[in-house]
Amino acid sequence: MSDQKLHFEYLDSPIGEIELTSTSNELLSVLFVKVGKITLEKQPFSFSPINAEAKKQLQAYFNKELTSFALPLRPAGTDFQKAVWQELQKIPYGTTISYLNLAKRLGDENAIRAVAAANGKNPISIIIPCHRVIGSDGKLVGYSGELWRKKWLLEQESGQASLF
């Protein structure tokens, strides 16, 4: 039987403090501690090898030493949300696609609003790269972690100082 205890760890990043939540063998969430006026209630630290590895990989990502993550993920969501999140993981580092293109990849361009909603519910920020989805007009839209973070992440990946 696998360990279902939740483990928490925190990472100070260039775009704010991040909470990592896992079981002993799967990463469950990567969330910004403070988004706008909302601040997560911090949980007591509890070591897990998955959180330690996620923290190490995120630090390497922020240092431009890592372009793809290799972690066991278990985001909680509906089957549709999970399908969207699977597709997000196929978007290469340093590139973007539109919400419309994402909907088309999933086989239904009319599902653009549902795709956008699922994108916004992604519980594993950065690692499941929902920040790589932009508006059809090329503009930054919709990021649950705040648009300034989305802009920062896209610029970090592109190597350019001012994309938007």
Image (tube, rainbow, N blue to C red):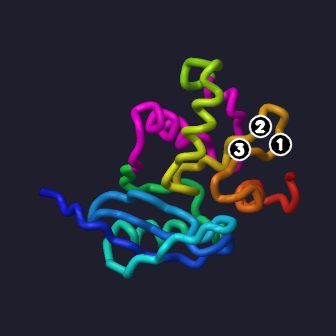
Give me the C-alpha separation between circle 3 and circle 1.
14 Å
Does the stretch in magenta take in 72? Answer: no
Q: Are the two marked residues, 2 and 1, in contact with CB atoms closer than 8 angstroms?
A: yes
Name the residue tied to disc 1: 139
Query: Tag 2, which secondary structure?
Result: loop
Could you classify mark 2 by the number of other residues whose Cα lies within 10 Å: few (under 14), some (14-19), or many (20 or more)?
Answer: some
| Nearer the observer, 5 or 90 | 5
- Whether residue 63 is situated above or below residue 28 in the rendered picture: below
Query: Residue at the spot x=55%, y=39% of the render?
Result: 118
Tag in front: 2 or 3: 2
Name the residue tied to disc 2: 135
Residue 40 spot, x, y in % from top left: 52, 70
- Count how many numbered circles sit on residues in the image: 3
Q: Residue furthest bottom?
A: 44
Query: Tag 3, which secondary structure?
Result: loop
Residue 54 spot, x, y in % from top left: 45, 66
Query: Residue at the spot x=71%, y=44% of the render?
Result: 95
Does the stretch in magenta take in 94? Answer: yes
Could you classify mark 3 by the number of other residues whose Cα lies within 10 Å: few (under 14), some (14-19), or many (20 or more)?
Answer: few
Tag in front: 3 or 1: 1
**Dot label at residue 115:** none
| Nearer the observer, 136 or 113 | 113
- Whether residue 93 is situated above or below residue 58 in the rendered picture: above
Q: Amino acid at mark 2?
A: Gly
Query: Residue at the spot x=31%, y=72% of the render?
Result: 48
Name the residue tied to disc 3: 95
Give me the C-alpha separation between circle 2 and circle 1.
5 Å
Quadrant of residue 9 within the rendered picture? bottom left
What span is in magenta?
75-103
For residue 95, side relative to residue 12 (left or right): right
Quadrant of residue 139 within the rendered picture? top right
